Image (spheres, grey):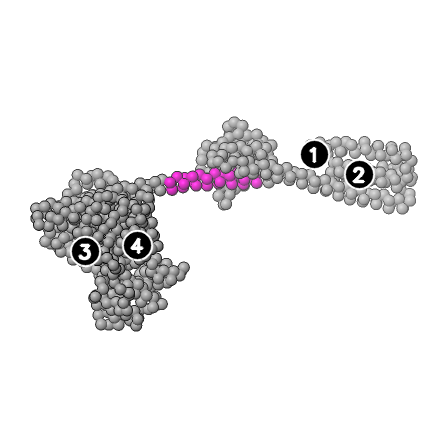
Amino acid sequence: MTRGTPLILVVDDDSSIRQTLSRELAAAGYDTVAAADGLEGKARFEESRPDLVITDLAMPRADGLAVITAVRRIDRTPVIVLSVRGEEEDKVRALDRGADDYVTKPFSLRELLARVRTQIRRAEAGPAVEVLRFPGLEIDRARRTVVRDGQDVRLTPTELAILELLAGHAGRPVTLRQIIAKVWKGAPATTVDTVRVHVGSLRRKLEPDPANPRYIGTEPWVGYRFLAELVE
Amino acid sequence: MAANAKGLAWIALPVAAALVTLLARFAGANATTAGFAYLLLVLGLATWGGWAVGAAASLVAMACFNFFFLPPYGTLTIQDPSNWVALITFLVASTVASRLVATARRRAEEAQSRRREVEILYDLCFGLFAASQRPGILGEAAARTLQAIGAESGGLYLAGEEAPVTTLGGDSEVDRNLLQRALETREIAEAGGTAYLPLHVGGTVNGVLVARGRLAPRTVLESAGRLLALAIERERLLGEAAHLEAVRESDTLKTSLLRAVSHDLRTPLTAMRLEIESLEGRLANQPDALASLGGLSLEQERLSRRIDNLLSLARLEAGVARPRPEPVPPSSLFRAARENLSLILAGRPVEVRVERSCPDTWADPSLALETLVNLLENAARAAPPERPLELAAGRDPEDRERIRLEVLDRGPGLPPGVKRMLQGTRDLRRNADAAAGDSASGGLGLQIARGLAEANGGSLALLDRPGGGTIARLILPAAPEPEEVEG
């Protein structure tokens, strides 16, 4: 990162939300640039190359999905979408299109700032480390071992692949489609039920109490989110 | 026409026999020539009048041949045994030839009549299907069919309808018994010159065509009936397609309307919430202002939930959003419900208990969450702030295939009005009106919660809690247990 202060692009057609978000993000220590619709958002992204994009989904001219597509065509800049309850399909579509996270309107500033911090941290982190450490859990990607509370956990290759994918995206949602694409390489016979079955079995082996998961949270409509935070 | 030709052939037989005899005698023909001449006579008459005329002509010709041309002349006796052979050969040849000719003629007539039938059916087919692609042509189709099968009057009666769709040549008496019989047996019923033609296609009878007059042969009637039945079926399918298209358009309209309303309501709410939080940050050192902002925040959150409720109900009622169940862990529902009510629950103890082996619920995540949020909000409002609220989940002991999600409080218990309302009618709108004046009781929120729970395939019960307080019990189906897998 060449800039000292991360730059955030805010794309929303509502001027009041745009202004408040810009002001509060500035107060939280970020630089901001704003756009009133998808077309302007794409232009601003290309000229200022921000470190993170926050975009509404329903907008005149080009919508949030168009913004995500435009960003992904250029690089892996994190994108957080502002979704609306009852429009779950749009949210999932945005995540599958490459968005990294979402908050649901009306969201709280605290919630949004927490998501922003997670994304900026992820973007600043170096290349993937070999050993992922979480409270009580250690995943060694090179040796393909999982240790929970000092005990080895024996996982099938599929379960391990799912765990690595989720833990590698700790704090961020991973959609069922993304899991199918990454773990099963998009094999045509794989359904969401297949994923659920393997996640269920992974939970039984990994979670101290599967009914109260500590690590793998269910994200309704979307998929899963790894709940624990990486230990530095 | 054919009967007339036969009659004439019978009359022509003696005349022609006499003529041939006279001509042969006059020309002085020998027995062989005369025999051929008589053979020609037999063939001609057989062609004209059919096999019976041909056979009679053979006998007459044989008698004349014997009488006038085989010695002794003028008698029906035969002297020379070789003439017996000639006579019998003549008889056999003429009979066989007349038979062949008559058969060929009958076949030609049959082919002709088949051609006419095919022409009738082709015209009908074209009239019914190719000529018009517009809906609403049943009457026209029936009239064309009646015309094609030669009916002078008649009408189309659709199955399950009392009055005819259309009549041709005036209204006349219809025998309901025969009509019914045709419908049930799928066979043509006939009485007094009226045919009741069942119209069936693909195993179902969709009506009866009543036809009077000099009707086409039965095979034509049956085929015409099938064609008309197909036309009726097509008409029905066209109608259904038009209806589906209308429903689809109306659904699209409702969906986009609800989306627009949802967007327009939530955007200002989001702006409000952000403004309030922003102000809270800037007025951190002014306790009075902060207290007011806290109140504003709570109200904003409540408004937001009511809008969620109303939009969910509107979606369900409009039929544009059917519940989409998936496995939802109770713990994630509890976590989301607490996050949703973070302001109301701020500083309040909430105890969460999920049984160790509790399976996931099989529910629409949005609806289940909304129901739970309403119940938790209600409990938070009813119970004193220092008493903990409890969230509990486990298998329903009465039905292991179901999950019990409970919100327990130590409030004053249920007001009688709310209990009555929840036990009463299931008409949400009526109850919502009744509850509107009693919003402090949380009646509307509970009513909506019950509506959402039922839409989710579950149920909601409010029970008095032993030792004081209320148990709000939401029962949802359990998700199917995943099987163990390897790989």
Q: Identify whether B414 is placed above or below B149.
A: below
Q: Residue at x 19, y 44 (%)?
A: B272
* Disc 2 residue crowd, few under 14, some 14–19, many 20+, Cα 10 Å: many
From the top left corner, tell me how far across and down residue A218 is, in percent: 27, 58
Q: Amino acid at mark 4?
A: Ala
> Which chain is indicated by disc 4?
A
Q: CA distance from mark 1 to mark 4?
A: 87 Å
List the residue tagged with mark 1.
B2
Q: CA distance from mark 4 to mark 3?
A: 33 Å
Distance between the alpha carbons at the discs numbered 1 and 3: 96 Å
Mark 1 or mark 4, whichever is nearer to me: 4
- Residue ID for mark 4: A99
Kindly indicate whether the residues beneath marks 2 and 4 are on one polypeptide chain: no
Q: What whole-number distance in Å separates the C-alpha atoms at marks 1 and 2?
A: 19 Å
In the shown orientation, is residue B52 left or right of residue B429? right
Crowding near the residue tagged with mark 1, few <14, some 14–19, many ≥20 C-alpha atoms within 10 Å: few
Q: Are marks 4 and 3 in contact (CB under 8 Å)?
A: no
Q: Residue at x 17, y 42 (%)?
A: B439
Q: Is label 2 in a helix, a strand or a loop?
A: helix
Q: Position of residue A228 (x, y in %)?
A: 22, 62
Disc 2 target residue: B42
Kind of residue sitting beneath label 1: Ala
Residue topped by disc 3:
B391
> Of the residues tagged 4 and 3, which is closer to the observer?
4
For the residue pair B129 and A57, the one nearer the viewer reads as: A57
Cα separation between marks 2 and 4: 99 Å
The magenta stretch is B221-249
Q: Secondary structure at mark 3?
A: strand
- Mark 2 is on which residue type? Val
Instruction: Pick out the residue farthest to the top.
Output: B170
